[in-house]
Amino acid sequence: MQLFFEQLLNGIAMGSIYALVTLGLALVYGILRILHVAHAAVYTVGAYAGLFCYSHTGSLLLAFLGGMIFCSILGVAIERLVYYPLLKYPPYVPLIGSIAIMLSIEEICRLVAGPYILTFPATLPFPEFQLGGVTISSTLTAVYVITTAVLGLLWFISTKTELGLAMRATSQDIPIADAMGINSHAIVSIAFVIGSSIAAIAGILVGIYYNQVYPTMGTVPAYKTLALIVVGGLGSMPGAVIASMLLGVAETLLIGYADIPLPRDALAFIAMIAVLMWRSEGLMGSK
Amino acid sequence: MDAYLITIGTLIIIYAITVYGLNVIVGYAGQISLGHAAFFGIGAYASALLTTKAGLSFWEALPIVILLSGLIGIVLGLPSLRLREDFLAITTIGINFIVEALFLYVPYFGGALGIGGIPRVVLFGVKLKGMAFFLLCLGFLALVIFICWWFTRSWGGVACFALREEESAAASVGISPVRFKLLAFVIGTMMAGLGGALYAHYMRFISATDFSFPMSITFLSMIVLGGMGTLWGPLLGAVLLGILPELFRPIVDYRILFYTALLLVMIRFQPAGLLGEGSIVHKWLILKPAGGRP
């Protein structure tokens, strides 16, 4: 039973990290209707930028801040230079562009930082808990607290502020939003800043959680998060979070208990195809 | 001709055959597929298993392989009837990952070790290798291009173009989206199956990673580069993307970066491809002779 709870806690942590990456993807899809595969590359860059700042300053706060700023610039650059000019083409055009960006950034990371696995020797300043014989390590606590904080902040921004209102208007209809006096291009950029910052946080958390940072760490999340936003309902942020949590727990428990002849990475896609056949708008999507 | 050139040429032609199949699905019928390597792999594995485990010859196995690929194409093409563009793109990515996982984890498919000892193709009692196999592949490519040419001029092809441009309008004049999308899927996956079979008997050893998602991206890049929906675009794309990595061999470390950067620049500035409508080459070819401004 103790093992089960430990697995469950790890699963929730996995799910939290999936949720952080998937949120940015859902945010971008909601507004631009682009499948932002390169988001996972932004997450990799976040981990590298965070590690760079951490090893030069020794401060985790600066690592998070540096990663977020660098990723925001990268995210906005991707949006301005590639996505925005391609909006008038059919959706596969920006999608292929996004995959090309993803692979290019991966290569640049490999060339700049080297092809090997770097360690991220940091401990997050969070307390450890003992709960009925199960230890919740400080890293797990950090993942839970930071994810909850990010989700709360995002919920507050999108429902309680004028910025959130403008973002929702832009995601419904860009020309109409423009006509109502919203600078939709600026809103799109802000969405990329928010999504990319969250990706940086996720990248640094993963780097610390596994104590690994390497160029291809974004490859599996890149496509798995696509499956997750489909399961959650394209563009729905609550759906993306729920789907991520479910997948994180399901993956960890299935690997721990069931002897299935499939790698865990195929699970997300099987779940996705099942969801598409049964409820093609996703868990929380609207027709 | 030296063996190095023949090797590259043969692979380019095998890829071109497969990419023509993808062009029927994506270029003609407008159904985005990011999982074409899965069908390429299904053809390769089917042919490898039929020849090594069931003891058939390449020529006996080939019709079965092509039919099987087409059949699986129908089954996996069914999602395209329900799904819009973005959903379909992600679903085909998922299909690619699942098929690769099955090849890798089911012991019957050789697992991580793959399948080795695939026999060479025998024609008139002669084992084909080198130049002879190259010519055989070239013959198949000519057949595939002919089928594509014939398809674009047939009722089925015209119906697919109509569906690609505007599905509801096409449906309202009596073109069945179900029938013609599936037709495109079947033709496309059959060509991929043929390409896969040739690949298996050329390499004589296959493993799951040969058919992973990056391969699908390469296939799609080839038609994007050459020109989606054109007759000669897939061939041009396969030749260019087949030769470029060889030319970049001196700068081996930057090869993939160069390759992906090229794809990015291409899709950013010439999304219709080199031979597609509105591209530089297209304007030059069409407008120059007519005296128009390029």
Image (cartoon, grey):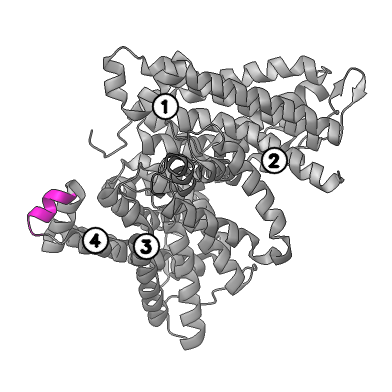
CA gap, disc 1 to disc 3? 31 Å
Of marks 1 and 4, the one in the foreground = 1
The x and y percentages for residue B231 are: 54, 31
Q: Nearer the viewer, residue A278 or B181?
A: B181
CA gap, disc 1 to disc 2? 29 Å
Majority secondary structure of magenta residues: helix
CA gap, disc 4 to disc 2? 49 Å
Q: Write the residue at 47% across / 75% down.
A: A49
Q: Secondary structure at mark 3?
A: helix
Which comes before the other along the chain, label 4 or label 3? 3
Q: Disc 2 marks which residue?
A: B12
CA gap, disc 1 to disc 4? 34 Å
Most distant residue in the bottom direction = A57
User: Which label was assigned to residue A76?
Assistant: none
- Label 1 is placed on what type of residue? Ser
CA gap, disc 3 to disc 2? 33 Å
Q: Secondary structure at mark 4?
A: helix
First to last magenta residue range:
A174-181
The chain carrying label 4 is A
Q: Disc 4 marks which residue?
A: A154
Q: Is residue B148 left or right of residue A240?
A: right
- Label 2 is placed on what type of residue? Ile
- Label 3 is placed on what type of residue? Leu
Of marks 4 and 2, the one in the foreground = 2
Of marks 1 and 3, the one in the foreground = 3
Do callouts 1 and 3 mark residues in contact (Cβ within 8 Å)?
Answer: no
Q: Disc 3 marks which residue?
A: A81
- Label 4 is placed on what type of residue? Leu
User: Which label was assigned to residue B80?
Assistant: 1
Q: Residues within 10 Å of mark 2 (few under 14, many from 20)?
A: many
Q: Does residue B231 show up magenta in the picture? A: no
